[in-house]
Image (tube, rainbow, N blue to C red):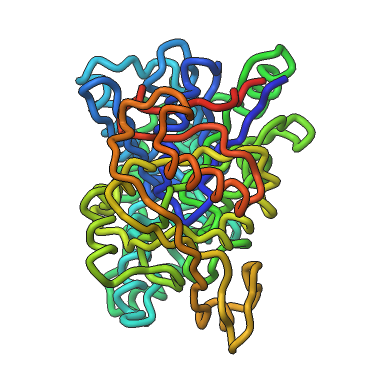
Amino acid sequence: MPALVLLGAQWGDEGKGKATDLLGGSVDYVVRYQGGNNAGHTVVVGDQKYALHLLPSGILSPGCTPVIGNGVVVDPAVLLSELSGLNERGVDTSKLVISGNAHLITPYNITVDKVTERFLGKRKIGTTGRGIGPTYADKINRTGIRVQDLFDESILHQKVEAALDFKNQVLAKLYNHRAVVAEQVVEEMLGYADQIRGYVADTTLLLNNAIDDGKVVLFEGGQGTLLDVDHGTYPFVTSSNPTAGGACTGAGVGPTKISRVIGILKAYTTRVGAGPFPTELFDADGEALRTIGGERGVTTGRDRRCGWFDAVIARYATRVNGLTDFFLTKLDVLTGWEQIPVCVAYEIDGKRVEELPYSQTDFHHAKPIYETLPGWSEDITKAKTFAELPKNAQAYVKALEEMSGAPISAIGVGPGRDETIQINSFLD
């Protein structure tokens, strides 16, 4: 009964797409369980690079059924555009399944997101402006629009009008923005109905039956642990739960059916958007990591903030997710450094702290305490086994494993699908 959760163990952008794609040929279902098109995965297959924003990475694996779970928020325009782009490149997208309970991002959600960020000015969160947060807010406020509502025009119209009764007051009186016309929203949303209808199903029933039948199901999180709305660096977080518990609520599968939880770690650390980042570099090393690692957001196009590996947040990710394994990515980016600092603890108010502080204030003032490990200069992109890595690269991996609290079972040594060292199978 192998049901696996695969998630980011830092602030997102760790290379989850590569990890999911590596497993895609061995699993029957790949499920997105939270987030929306604010998450991006880059997958390299041969000489082809695919940037996925909303679709599960498993859509690139023949024989795998990709599923968008109920915990995802779906922009129908983005969904159809992404499907069209893959179809034009010869990718079969016909097996995609979408939960009828997933919430839809409406045009007014996007409007609210953008005007709110502008209004906040220097206090802005750094959202992608794609309507993700306002859609989740509507969901919690019970004024959201779900995929299934596209197929009942009367219900859709009632729900849109109810949502806009309040939102138009806020847009006009607080933000000096023109009102959104309900009929125009309904007309636009209904235009997607026939194009999406064939993909919609009861995904909770589908996935539970699949697990009970012995199928391999992989739950794929977007963003990362430190962006979780409950367990991340609040308020600089996303609006959903990328942590392992989110897989259960976002896909409708009970925790007793999860057999393994895999955390994806970069060999260094990056972050997009605002918020505290203890190991962030503002020097030549930071620029080198950004340039060599190609650190630009797949979805946002924004340069990522870069810093050295932070073992404190890795340990935290192990704890809150119950991680059984790590997949370490982008080890090749560190080739060429004579010495590589690793953050092993923080200094807060003159005291050494080895666990992530629960206080937002303490974390904001945390200063990294580094240990320095010897680097390597040899090209590692052709390594197929752990033993083929340079001794210093092996020592670096082992040190990170010991500091992080879970075994490193795979290592990315290059961007390609085949540039991965598998140490332990994730499917045992």
Vertical order, 221 against 309 (above or below): above
- Say if residue 98 shows up in the picture: yes
Vertical order, 206 against 294 (above or below): above
Please report the residue visible at 27 percent of the width from the left and 24 percent of the height from the top.
Answer: 86
Question: 8 or 300: which is nearer to us?
Answer: 8
Vertical order, 285 against 94 (above or below): below
Please report the residue visible at 53 percent of the width from the left and 16 percent of the height from the top.
Answer: 26
Q: Which x, y percent locates residue 171? A: 35, 73
Q: Which x, y percent locates residue 139? A: 56, 54
Q: Which x, y percent locates residue 381? A: 31, 31
Please report the residue visible at 62 percent of the width from the left and 39 percent of the height from the top.
Answer: 407
Q: Is residue 103 left or right of residue 209?
A: left
Vertical order, 278 against 212 (above or below): below
Question: 287 or 124: which is nearer to us?
Answer: 287
Q: How many numbered dots are placed on residues in this image?
A: 0
Q: Quadrant of the C terminus?
A: top right
Q: Which x, y percent locates residue 358? A: 65, 73
Residue at the farthest bottom position: 349
- Say if residue 155 shows up in the picture: no
Q: Is residue 206 left or right of residue 178?
A: right
Question: 258 or 109: which is nearer to us?
Answer: 258
Please report the residue visible at 47 percent of the width from the left and 21 percent of the height from the top.
Answer: 24
Q: Quadrant of the N terminus?
A: top right
* Quadrant in which residue 181 is drawn: bottom left
* Quadrant in which residue 409 is drawn: top right
